[in-house]
């Protein structure tokens, strides 16, 4: 017998055994994505904030927080290991991360019940725990990265899966509280599953997801970052857990304390305007949609179907009297008017350049008074829009990239100015419909209509007109972002660029979408090229269309049975 071969064989078996053992250990520490407890997980609860005072307050550091990954390989052995990890003397929070062999389908698989048996085993473990159990499921869903399988997914799919998970947990254990766990990134509200499904909310500081995200600039001031995260969950009247990635140091503690202090000082604005509609019912316009145009070259406004004209004005137009002349001309054409008021380009010497602060400090009261005098003289409907597209994180307008609380105060000040709003004036809140629009929601009492802008060309990186998104694709995405307002929609700007035959096709889709969405009260075409200064080194898109294309749009829309 070849002893050398035998020795090599035995050594090989030993090495193989060690490898198998190590792989087994690797799996059990959640480093392959299979079902396991993640022993490297460190997201302590740094603070518990409950503005309602209903939540049983206990020190944040008394919560044991652990994380488990569940996929279809989970079994009773996996969950027995979880149970052994739970400290029976403490309340516990368990972050559950769910994965699938086809990760892009994990939300649909959860909603379809394909994980139900696993979830029931999980519930048996939580039911046996003698203290309270908080369960946080598939967190940081709103951050636009692909760190987790459930990110970059449809909000509708996430909400449906979350509701299913919550329902299973609630049936299986009476001591379970469900935690909805966004990071607190712009767009948080889009993924809200509803107050009946959620017991607590959490936000995360310094999360890995946000460190990978590039859609929005990182807020360098920690106190401000915390305030914005709290503000993004203001519609959810639930106790709030603030999570970190390490134990709280003195700087983080001070930042949280100061952020909460400022939030409490602004509570009347932040929470007094936070009423939303969770019924799921859409506002319904019983009449055919109002048709309007922004048409400085006067190419479309003579169409019999145009009932409304759109003008953009600023402080200078009021100070110099040019707005009143344009207003009177529109009234003579027997049209209603959309007035988008931009609070800038002041011709007077003013020291403070913060236009929102100037608004609430009364700096522009004389101009506001003159504006309302002109508007009140009309015997036609005036749709008044103030400081639009405020949520886009750029500096095209002076009121963009500002504190949302300051914006809300300014919007309310303007719309309630002197209690002089005549019955003919309809208040329009005008986000672009970008991520995080509802962060700037000013309260339903100062909003009659919500407007969004729909342009086929999504950004400067796409210059091929055939790559534009359809009207319907854009509308569905943007409506989801403003749906919690519960107000009818007035699309005060929309447009498409490209060859005329492409524009006609795009406008046909727009007409079909408008016909099928009864919450759309009106639409207004932007019949001009955009501002060249905004587009840098490429030509500004020209949204102008021919009269024939516009008439075809009207004819397609005329099939509306409303």
Image (tube, rainbow, N blue to C red):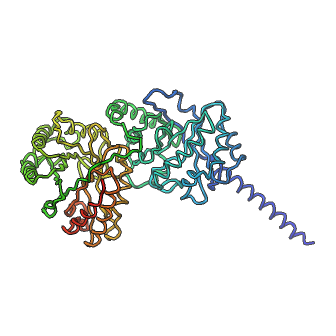
For image coordinates 35% across by 58% down, the residue present is 474
Q: Is residue 40 left or right of residue 483?
A: right
For image coordinates 76% across by 57% down, the residue present is 18
Residue 320 locus on image (x, y percent): 6, 48
For image coordinates 35% across by 64% down, the residue present is 469
Q: In the image shown, does 362 or 523 lie closer to the viewer?
A: 523
Residue 128 locus on image (x, y percent): 68, 35
Task: Give the number of marks.
Answer: 0
User: Image quarter for residue 84?
Assistant: top right
Res 65 visible: no
Which image quarter is the N terminus in?
bottom right
Q: Is residue 382 left or right of residue 405?
A: left
Q: Residue furthest right?
A: 1
User: Image quarter for residue 511?
Assistant: bottom left
For image coordinates 17% across by 42% down, the residue present is 424
Q: In the image shown, does 143 or 556 lie closer to the viewer?
A: 556
Q: Residue furthest front?
A: 561
Q: In the image shown, does 188 or 516 lie closer to the viewer?
A: 516
Q: In the image shown, does 141 or 290 lie closer to the viewer?
A: 290
Looking at the image, is 363 positioned above or below residue 23? above
Looking at the image, is 24 positioned above or below residue 441? below
Residue 522 locus on image (x, y percent): 25, 52
Looking at the image, is 175 positioned above or below residue 71? above
User: Image quarter for residue 369?
Assistant: top left
Looking at the image, is 186 positioned above or below residue 496? above
Res 361 visible: yes
Residue 388 locus on image (x, y percent): 25, 49
């Amino acid at each position: 017998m070849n002893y050398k071969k035998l020795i090599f064989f035995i050594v090989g078996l030993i090495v193989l055994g060690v490898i198998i053992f190590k792989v087994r250990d690797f799996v059990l520490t959640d480093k392959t994505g299979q079902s396991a407890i993640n022993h490297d997980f460190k997201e302590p609860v740094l603070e518990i904030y409950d503005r309602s005072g209903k939540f049983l307050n206990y020190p944040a550091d008394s919560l044991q927080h652990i994380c488990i990954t569940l996929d279809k390989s989970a079994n009773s052995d996996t969950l027995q290991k979880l149970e052994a990890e739970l400290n029976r003397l403490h309340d516990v929070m368990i972050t559950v991360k769910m994965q699938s062999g086809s990760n892009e389908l994990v939300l649909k698989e959860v909603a379809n019940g394909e994980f139900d048996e696993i979830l029931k085993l999980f519930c048996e473990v939580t039911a046996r725990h003698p203290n309270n159990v908080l369960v946080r499921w598939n967190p940081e869903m709103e951050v636009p990265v692909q760190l987790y399988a459930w990110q970059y997914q449809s909000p509708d799919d996430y909400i449906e899966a979350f509701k299913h998970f919550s329902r299973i947990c609630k049936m299986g254990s009476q001591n379970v509280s469900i935690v909805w766990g966004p990071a607190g990134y712009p767009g948080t509200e889009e993924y809200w599953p509803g107050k009946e499904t959620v017991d607590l909310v959490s936000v995360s500081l310094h999360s890995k997801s946000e460190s990978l995200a590039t859609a929005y600039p990182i807020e360098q001031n920690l106190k401000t970052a915390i305030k914005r995260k709290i503000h993004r969950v203001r519609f959810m009247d639930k106790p709030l857990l603030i999570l970190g990635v390490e134990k709280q140091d003195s700087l983080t503690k001070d930042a949280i304390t100061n952020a909460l202090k400022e939030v409490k000082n602004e509570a009347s604005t932040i929470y007094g305007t936070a009423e939303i509609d969770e019924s799921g019912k859409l506002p319904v316009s019983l009449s055919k949609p109002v048709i309007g145009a922004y048409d400085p070259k006067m190419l479309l406004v003579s169409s019999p179907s145009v009932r409304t004209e759109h003008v953009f004005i600023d402080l200078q137009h009021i100070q110099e009297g040019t707005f009143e002349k344009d207003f009177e001309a529109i009234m003579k054409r027997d049209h209603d008017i959309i007035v988008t008021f931009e609070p800038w380009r002041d011709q007077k010497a003013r020291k403070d350049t913060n236009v929102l602060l100037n608004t609430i400090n009364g700096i522009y009261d004389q101009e506001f008074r003159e504006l309302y005098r002109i508007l009140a003289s009309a015997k036609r409907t005036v749709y008044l829009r103030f400081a639009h597209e405020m949520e886009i994180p750029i500096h095209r307008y002076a009121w963009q990239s500002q504190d949302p609380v300051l914006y809300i105060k300014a919007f309310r000040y303007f719309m309630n100015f002197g209690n002089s709003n005549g019955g003919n004036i309809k208040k329009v809140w005008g986000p672009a419909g970008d991520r995080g629009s509802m962060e700037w929601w000013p309260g339903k009492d100062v909003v009659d209509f919500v407007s969004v802008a729909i342009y086929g060309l999504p950004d400067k990186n796409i210059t091929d007109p055939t790559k534009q998104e359809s009207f319907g694709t854009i509308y569905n995405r943007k409506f989801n972002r403003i749906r919690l307002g519960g107000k009818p929609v007035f699309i005060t700007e929309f447009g498409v660029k490209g060859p005329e035959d492409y524009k006609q096709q795009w406008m046909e889709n727009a007409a079909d979408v408008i016909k099928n969405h009864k919450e759309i009260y009106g639409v207004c075409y932007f019949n001009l090229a955009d501002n060249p200064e905004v587009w840098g080194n490429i030509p500004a898109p020209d949204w102008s269309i021919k009269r024939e294309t516009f008439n075809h749009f009207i004819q397609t829309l005329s099939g509306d049975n409303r």
